[in-house]
Image (cartoon, rainbow, N blue to C red):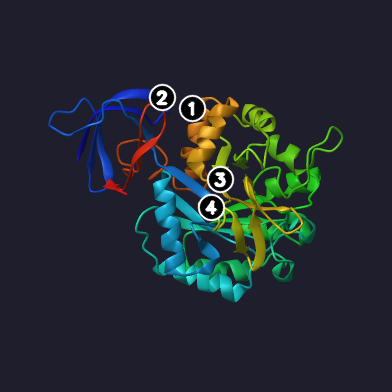
Amino acid sequence: MLLKNCTFYNELFEKEFGDIRIENGKISEIGMLSGDGKDMSGKIILPGFIDIHIHGCAGGDFSDGNEEAFDKMSAELARHGVTSFCGTTMTLPQEKLKSIASAAERYSAPKSKLVGINLEGPYIALGKKGAQNAEYIRACNTDELSELMNIYKKIKLITIAPEASDSEEFIKEMSKKLTVSIGHSEADEAECRKAIESGISHATHLYNAMTPMTHRDAGIVGAALDSDITCELICDGAHICPTVLRNTFRILGEDRACVISDSMRAAGLGTGKFELGGQTVYVREGGKTAVMADGTIAASITNLFDEFRNLLSFGIDFKSALKACTINPARAIGEDKSIGSVAAGKCADLIITDEALEIQEVYINGTLA
Protein backbone atom coordinates (compact mmCIF):
# COMPACT_ATOMS: atom_id res chain seq x y z
CA MET A 1 0.00 0.00 0.00
CA LEU A 2 1.20 3.50 -0.83
CA LEU A 3 -0.08 6.57 1.01
CA LYS A 4 0.43 9.67 -1.15
CA ASN A 5 0.67 13.37 -0.27
CA CYS A 6 1.05 12.72 3.45
CA THR A 7 1.49 15.38 6.09
CA PHE A 8 2.98 13.37 8.95
CA TYR A 9 5.15 13.63 12.04
CA ASN A 10 8.45 11.96 11.35
CA GLU A 11 10.93 10.08 13.52
CA LEU A 12 12.08 13.37 15.04
CA PHE A 13 8.45 14.36 15.64
CA GLU A 14 8.70 17.22 13.20
CA LYS A 15 6.06 17.85 10.54
CA GLU A 16 7.06 16.49 7.13
CA PHE A 17 5.44 16.05 3.71
CA GLY A 18 5.91 12.96 1.53
CA ASP A 19 4.69 9.49 0.69
CA ILE A 20 4.65 6.39 2.90
CA ARG A 21 4.95 2.89 1.50
CA ILE A 22 3.67 -0.01 3.62
CA GLU A 23 4.68 -3.62 2.98
CA ASN A 24 4.06 -6.70 5.13
CA GLY A 25 2.67 -4.63 7.98
CA LYS A 26 5.70 -2.33 8.20
CA ILE A 27 6.71 1.04 6.84
CA SER A 28 9.16 0.14 4.11
CA GLU A 29 9.92 3.54 2.62
CA ILE A 30 9.27 7.24 3.19
CA GLY A 31 9.92 9.99 0.64
CA MET A 32 8.67 11.31 -2.66
CA LEU A 33 7.78 7.94 -4.16
CA SER A 34 6.59 6.97 -7.63
CA GLY A 35 3.37 5.09 -8.24
CA ASP A 36 -0.32 5.50 -7.55
CA GLY A 37 -1.68 5.28 -4.06
CA LYS A 38 -4.25 6.52 -1.59
CA ASP A 39 -4.39 10.31 -1.56
CA MET A 40 -3.97 11.67 1.99
CA SER A 41 -4.26 15.35 1.09
CA GLY A 42 -5.83 17.39 3.86
CA LYS A 43 -5.08 14.70 6.44
CA ILE A 44 -2.56 14.54 9.28
CA ILE A 45 -0.77 11.27 10.07
CA LEU A 46 0.36 10.54 13.62
CA PRO A 47 2.13 7.46 14.98
CA GLY A 48 -0.20 5.04 16.75
CA PHE A 49 -0.61 5.74 20.45
CA ILE A 50 0.63 3.32 23.12
CA ASP A 51 -1.14 2.87 26.46
CA ILE A 52 1.19 1.09 28.87
CA HIS A 53 -1.18 1.31 31.86
CA ILE A 54 -4.78 0.35 31.16
CA HIS A 55 -7.03 -1.95 33.20
CA GLY A 56 -10.01 -2.00 30.90
CA CYS A 57 -12.62 -0.28 28.77
CA ALA A 58 -15.88 -1.00 26.91
CA GLY A 59 -16.97 -3.46 29.60
CA GLY A 60 -13.80 -5.55 29.50
CA ASP A 61 -11.16 -5.72 32.22
CA PHE A 62 -7.73 -7.25 31.68
CA SER A 63 -8.00 -8.89 35.10
CA ASP A 64 -11.01 -10.85 33.80
CA GLY A 65 -8.30 -12.91 32.15
CA ASN A 66 -10.29 -14.09 29.14
CA GLU A 67 -10.41 -13.53 25.39
CA GLU A 68 -13.80 -11.80 25.47
CA ALA A 69 -12.52 -9.07 27.80
CA PHE A 70 -9.27 -8.68 25.85
CA ASP A 71 -11.22 -8.36 22.59
CA LYS A 72 -13.45 -5.61 24.01
CA MET A 73 -10.38 -3.66 25.05
CA SER A 74 -8.55 -4.24 21.78
CA ALA A 75 -11.46 -3.02 19.64
CA GLU A 76 -12.26 0.03 21.78
CA LEU A 77 -8.64 1.12 21.97
CA ALA A 78 -8.21 0.89 18.21
CA ARG A 79 -11.23 3.14 17.77
CA HIS A 80 -9.41 5.83 19.74
CA GLY A 81 -6.06 5.52 17.97
CA VAL A 82 -4.35 3.34 20.57
CA THR A 83 -2.58 0.75 18.45
CA SER A 84 -0.61 -1.01 21.22
CA PHE A 85 -1.27 -1.54 24.92
CA CYS A 86 -0.05 -3.25 28.06
CA GLY A 87 -2.94 -4.95 29.81
CA THR A 88 -2.70 -3.99 33.47
CA THR A 89 -3.55 -6.22 36.41
CA MET A 90 -4.59 -5.27 39.92
CA THR A 91 -3.24 -6.61 43.22
CA LEU A 92 -4.46 -10.22 43.02
CA PRO A 93 -3.60 -13.71 44.29
CA GLN A 94 -0.73 -15.43 42.50
CA GLU A 95 -2.98 -18.12 41.02
CA LYS A 96 -5.19 -15.46 39.43
CA LEU A 97 -2.16 -13.63 38.03
CA LYS A 98 -0.90 -16.91 36.57
CA SER A 99 -4.28 -17.46 34.91
CA ILE A 100 -4.19 -13.97 33.37
CA ALA A 101 -0.62 -14.51 32.14
CA SER A 102 -1.66 -17.82 30.54
CA ALA A 103 -4.58 -16.13 28.79
CA ALA A 104 -2.28 -13.38 27.50
CA GLU A 105 0.18 -15.97 26.18
CA ARG A 106 -2.60 -17.57 24.11
CA TYR A 107 -4.13 -14.30 22.93
CA SER A 108 -3.96 -12.82 19.43
CA ALA A 109 -5.41 -9.31 19.35
CA PRO A 110 -7.91 -8.53 16.57
CA LYS A 111 -7.32 -4.75 16.66
CA SER A 112 -5.02 -2.88 19.09
CA LYS A 113 -1.99 -5.04 19.85
CA LEU A 114 -1.35 -6.54 23.27
CA VAL A 115 2.39 -5.88 23.63
CA GLY A 116 2.78 -6.84 27.26
CA ILE A 117 1.47 -6.99 30.81
CA ASN A 118 1.80 -4.28 33.43
CA LEU A 119 1.58 -5.66 36.98
CA GLU A 120 0.21 -2.89 39.23
CA GLY A 121 1.07 -4.62 42.49
CA PRO A 122 0.82 -6.84 44.43
CA TYR A 123 3.98 -5.58 46.20
CA ILE A 124 2.59 -2.22 47.31
CA ALA A 125 1.97 -0.26 50.53
CA LEU A 126 -1.24 -0.74 52.47
CA GLY A 127 -1.45 2.97 53.27
CA LYS A 128 -1.38 3.92 49.57
CA LYS A 129 -3.40 1.03 48.16
CA GLY A 130 -6.05 3.26 46.58
CA ALA A 131 -8.59 0.98 44.91
CA GLN A 132 -6.36 -2.10 45.30
CA ASN A 133 -7.59 -4.99 47.45
CA ALA A 134 -5.67 -5.01 50.76
CA GLU A 135 -6.23 -8.76 51.19
CA TYR A 136 -3.73 -9.59 48.45
CA ILE A 137 -0.94 -7.09 49.20
CA ARG A 138 2.31 -8.87 50.00
CA ALA A 139 6.09 -8.49 50.12
CA CYS A 140 8.32 -8.44 47.03
CA ASN A 141 8.94 -11.97 45.81
CA THR A 142 11.34 -12.76 42.96
CA ASP A 143 10.14 -16.36 42.73
CA GLU A 144 6.53 -15.28 42.18
CA LEU A 145 7.47 -12.78 39.49
CA SER A 146 9.79 -15.22 37.76
CA GLU A 147 6.99 -17.78 37.71
CA LEU A 148 4.74 -15.29 35.91
CA MET A 149 7.49 -14.38 33.44
CA ASN A 150 8.01 -18.04 32.64
CA ILE A 151 4.34 -18.23 31.65
CA TYR A 152 4.29 -14.98 29.66
CA LYS A 153 7.61 -13.58 28.48
CA LYS A 154 6.30 -10.05 27.79
CA ILE A 155 5.67 -8.85 31.33
CA LYS A 156 6.92 -5.32 30.82
CA LEU A 157 6.26 -3.40 34.04
CA ILE A 158 5.71 -3.95 37.73
CA THR A 159 4.74 -1.36 40.35
CA ILE A 160 6.22 -1.77 43.84
CA ALA A 161 6.43 0.17 47.10
CA PRO A 162 10.15 -0.19 47.90
CA GLU A 163 9.75 0.73 51.57
CA ALA A 164 6.99 -1.80 52.25
CA SER A 165 9.30 -4.83 52.25
CA ASP A 166 12.96 -5.75 51.83
CA SER A 167 13.04 -4.74 48.17
CA GLU A 168 16.65 -3.83 47.30
CA GLU A 169 17.72 -7.20 45.92
CA PHE A 170 14.34 -7.64 44.20
CA ILE A 171 14.81 -4.33 42.38
CA LYS A 172 18.42 -5.07 41.43
CA GLU A 173 17.57 -8.51 40.03
CA MET A 174 14.23 -7.83 38.36
CA SER A 175 15.16 -4.46 36.82
CA LYS A 176 17.46 -6.42 34.51
CA LYS A 177 14.39 -8.19 33.08
CA LEU A 178 11.60 -5.60 33.08
CA THR A 179 10.81 -2.03 34.09
CA VAL A 180 10.38 -1.69 37.85
CA SER A 181 8.23 1.30 38.81
CA ILE A 182 7.62 3.07 42.11
CA GLY A 183 4.00 3.63 43.04
CA HIS A 184 1.27 2.98 45.59
CA SER A 185 4.05 3.83 48.01
CA GLU A 186 4.67 5.74 51.24
CA ALA A 187 8.41 6.05 50.60
CA ASP A 188 10.14 9.24 51.65
CA GLU A 189 12.65 11.03 49.44
CA ALA A 190 15.64 9.03 50.69
CA GLU A 191 13.87 5.71 50.21
CA CYS A 192 12.81 6.72 46.71
CA ARG A 193 16.32 7.80 45.75
CA LYS A 194 17.77 4.54 47.09
CA ALA A 195 15.21 2.59 45.01
CA ILE A 196 16.16 4.55 41.89
CA GLU A 197 19.84 3.82 42.54
CA SER A 198 18.92 0.12 42.85
CA GLY A 199 17.21 0.07 39.45
CA ILE A 200 13.74 1.62 39.56
CA SER A 201 13.38 3.60 36.33
CA HIS A 202 9.72 4.59 36.20
CA ALA A 203 7.00 6.15 38.37
CA THR A 204 3.41 4.88 38.31
CA HIS A 205 0.74 7.58 37.78
CA LEU A 206 2.85 10.39 39.21
CA TYR A 207 1.18 12.35 42.05
CA ASN A 208 -1.48 9.69 42.63
CA ALA A 209 -1.05 7.12 45.45
CA MET A 210 2.38 8.34 46.51
CA THR A 211 4.01 10.78 48.93
CA PRO A 212 3.62 14.34 47.65
CA MET A 213 6.20 17.07 47.21
CA THR A 214 6.03 19.95 49.67
CA HIS A 215 8.44 22.82 50.30
CA ARG A 216 10.04 20.91 53.19
CA ASP A 217 9.80 17.29 52.01
CA ALA A 218 10.35 16.23 48.41
CA GLY A 219 8.62 12.87 48.79
CA ILE A 220 8.39 10.48 45.86
CA VAL A 221 7.05 13.18 43.56
CA GLY A 222 9.99 15.52 44.14
CA ALA A 223 12.59 12.74 43.99
CA ALA A 224 11.12 11.35 40.77
CA LEU A 225 11.03 14.76 39.10
CA ASP A 226 14.60 15.42 40.26
CA SER A 227 15.91 12.30 38.51
CA ASP A 228 16.03 10.83 35.02
CA ILE A 229 13.23 8.25 35.39
CA THR A 230 10.13 8.24 33.22
CA CYS A 231 6.85 9.27 34.83
CA GLU A 232 3.30 8.26 34.01
CA LEU A 233 0.68 11.01 33.89
CA ILE A 234 -3.11 10.65 33.78
CA CYS A 235 -4.21 13.66 31.76
CA ASP A 236 -7.99 13.58 32.11
CA GLY A 237 -8.04 16.92 33.92
CA ALA A 238 -9.24 15.30 37.16
CA HIS A 239 -6.32 13.17 38.39
CA ILE A 240 -3.89 16.10 37.89
CA CYS A 241 -4.94 19.71 37.39
CA PRO A 242 -3.83 21.53 34.21
CA THR A 243 -1.54 23.93 36.08
CA VAL A 244 0.38 21.06 37.67
CA LEU A 245 0.55 19.27 34.32
CA ARG A 246 2.08 22.34 32.67
CA ASN A 247 4.73 22.59 35.38
CA THR A 248 5.37 18.84 35.24
CA PHE A 249 5.96 18.86 31.49
CA ARG A 250 8.39 21.77 31.92
CA ILE A 251 10.42 19.66 34.36
CA LEU A 252 10.19 16.33 32.51
CA GLY A 253 10.90 17.79 29.09
CA GLU A 254 10.15 15.95 25.85
CA ASP A 255 11.46 12.51 26.73
CA ARG A 256 10.32 11.51 30.23
CA ALA A 257 6.52 11.94 30.31
CA CYS A 258 4.34 8.91 29.52
CA VAL A 259 0.63 9.61 29.15
CA ILE A 260 -1.48 6.71 30.42
CA SER A 261 -5.21 6.19 30.72
CA ASP A 262 -5.31 3.97 33.83
CA SER A 263 -8.87 3.41 32.62
CA MET A 264 -11.16 0.63 33.84
CA ARG A 265 -14.04 -1.28 32.27
CA ALA A 266 -16.43 1.67 32.58
CA ALA A 267 -14.50 3.72 30.01
CA GLY A 268 -16.79 4.40 27.08
CA LEU A 269 -19.94 3.14 28.83
CA GLY A 270 -21.31 6.21 30.63
CA THR A 271 -22.71 6.30 34.16
CA GLY A 272 -23.30 3.24 36.33
CA LYS A 273 -21.95 0.79 38.90
CA PHE A 274 -18.94 -1.28 37.91
CA GLU A 275 -16.36 -3.74 39.30
CA LEU A 276 -12.63 -3.09 39.64
CA GLY A 277 -10.30 -5.61 41.26
CA GLY A 278 -13.20 -7.23 43.11
CA GLN A 279 -14.46 -3.91 44.46
CA THR A 280 -17.49 -1.82 43.47
CA VAL A 281 -16.83 1.56 41.86
CA TYR A 282 -19.15 4.17 40.41
CA VAL A 283 -19.27 6.58 37.50
CA ARG A 284 -21.49 9.49 38.52
CA GLU A 285 -23.38 11.82 36.22
CA GLY A 286 -20.89 14.32 34.84
CA GLY A 287 -17.99 12.55 36.56
CA LYS A 288 -14.54 12.50 34.97
CA THR A 289 -13.41 9.39 36.88
CA ALA A 290 -14.64 6.17 38.46
CA VAL A 291 -14.85 6.53 42.23
CA MET A 292 -15.29 4.29 45.25
CA ALA A 293 -18.34 4.65 47.53
CA ASP A 294 -16.50 7.19 49.71
CA GLY A 295 -15.54 9.30 46.69
CA THR A 296 -11.92 8.10 46.43
CA ILE A 297 -10.75 8.11 42.82
CA ALA A 298 -10.49 4.48 41.71
CA ALA A 299 -9.52 4.75 38.06
CA SER A 300 -9.99 6.88 35.00
CA ILE A 301 -12.59 6.50 32.26
CA THR A 302 -10.58 8.30 29.59
CA ASN A 303 -8.46 7.29 26.58
CA LEU A 304 -5.10 8.47 25.30
CA PHE A 305 -6.41 10.42 22.33
CA ASP A 306 -8.78 12.47 24.48
CA GLU A 307 -5.88 13.06 26.89
CA PHE A 308 -3.68 14.19 24.00
CA ARG A 309 -6.28 16.74 22.97
CA ASN A 310 -6.62 17.78 26.63
CA LEU A 311 -2.88 18.44 26.83
CA LEU A 312 -3.01 20.67 23.78
CA SER A 313 -5.91 22.60 25.29
CA PHE A 314 -3.97 22.90 28.58
CA GLY A 315 -1.08 24.58 26.75
CA ILE A 316 1.36 21.67 26.37
CA ASP A 317 3.31 21.97 23.12
CA PHE A 318 2.36 19.55 20.33
CA LYS A 319 5.71 17.76 20.14
CA SER A 320 5.91 17.03 23.87
CA ALA A 321 2.29 15.86 23.99
CA LEU A 322 2.74 13.59 20.97
CA LYS A 323 5.98 12.01 22.23
CA ALA A 324 4.34 11.38 25.61
CA CYS A 325 1.66 9.28 23.90
CA THR A 326 3.96 7.39 21.53
CA ILE A 327 7.74 7.02 21.65
CA ASN A 328 8.18 7.68 25.38
CA PRO A 329 5.89 4.84 26.52
CA ALA A 330 7.38 2.62 23.80
CA ARG A 331 10.85 3.30 25.19
CA ALA A 332 9.67 2.73 28.78
CA ILE A 333 8.74 -0.86 27.91
CA GLY A 334 11.64 -1.51 25.52
CA GLU A 335 9.53 -1.59 22.35
CA ASP A 336 10.77 1.62 20.69
CA LYS A 337 12.60 -0.27 17.93
CA SER A 338 9.28 -1.50 16.50
CA ILE A 339 6.57 0.98 17.54
CA GLY A 340 6.22 4.57 18.70
CA SER A 341 7.10 6.66 15.66
CA VAL A 342 6.63 6.92 11.89
CA ALA A 343 9.89 5.50 10.55
CA ALA A 344 11.05 3.01 7.95
CA GLY A 345 11.31 -0.47 9.43
CA LYS A 346 8.74 0.11 12.14
CA CYS A 347 5.21 -1.27 12.32
CA ALA A 348 2.75 0.64 10.16
CA ASP A 349 0.68 1.81 13.15
CA LEU A 350 -0.86 5.10 12.07
CA ILE A 351 -3.62 7.49 13.13
CA ILE A 352 -5.18 9.47 10.28
CA THR A 353 -6.92 12.67 11.40
CA ASP A 354 -8.40 15.70 9.73
CA GLU A 355 -6.89 19.12 10.33
CA ALA A 356 -9.04 19.53 13.45
CA LEU A 357 -7.46 16.34 14.89
CA GLU A 358 -10.62 14.28 14.56
CA ILE A 359 -9.75 10.62 13.92
CA GLN A 360 -10.68 9.46 10.42
CA GLU A 361 -8.88 6.11 10.17
CA VAL A 362 -6.52 3.95 12.21
CA TYR A 363 -4.04 1.48 10.72
CA ILE A 364 -2.49 -1.32 12.78
CA ASN A 365 0.33 -3.24 11.11
CA GLY A 366 -0.79 -1.61 7.87
CA THR A 367 -4.36 -2.90 8.13
CA LEU A 368 -7.35 -0.61 8.55
CA ALA A 369 -8.68 -1.19 12.08
Chain-order first, disc 3 or disc 2: 2
The front one of 200 and 323 is 323
The answer to whether the residue labelled 2 contacts the one labelled 1, judged by CB atoms less than 8 Å apart, is yes
Mark 4 to mark 2 CA distance (whole Å): 32 Å
The answer to whether the residue labelled 3 contacts the one labelled 2, judged by CB atoms less than 8 Å apart, is no
In the figure, residue 159 lies in which quadrant? Answer: bottom right
Chain-order first, disc 1 or disc 3: 3
Chain-order first, disc 4 or disc 3: 3
The answer to whether the residue labelled 4 contacts the one labelled 2, judged by CB atoms less than 8 Å apart, is no
What quarter of the picture does the N terminus occupy?
top left
Q: Secondary structure at mark 2?
A: loop
- Amino acid type of the residue that numbered disc 1 sits on in the rendered structure: Lys
Where is mark 4, residue-wise? Answer: 267
Where is mark 3, residue-wise? Answer: 260
Residue at 60% of width from left, 62% of height from top? 274
Q: Position of residue 58 (x, y in %)?
A: 48, 57
Q: Residues within 10 Å of mark 2 (few under 14, many from 20)?
A: few
Residue 119, compared with residue 82, is above or below; it is below
Where is mark 2, residue-wise? Answer: 14
81 on left or right of 43: right
Q: Nearer the viewer, mark 3 or mark 2?
A: 3
- Amino acid type of the residue that numbered disc 2 sits on in the rendered structure: Glu
Residue at 50% of width from left, 51% of height from top? 268
Mark 3 to mark 2 CA distance (whole Å): 23 Å
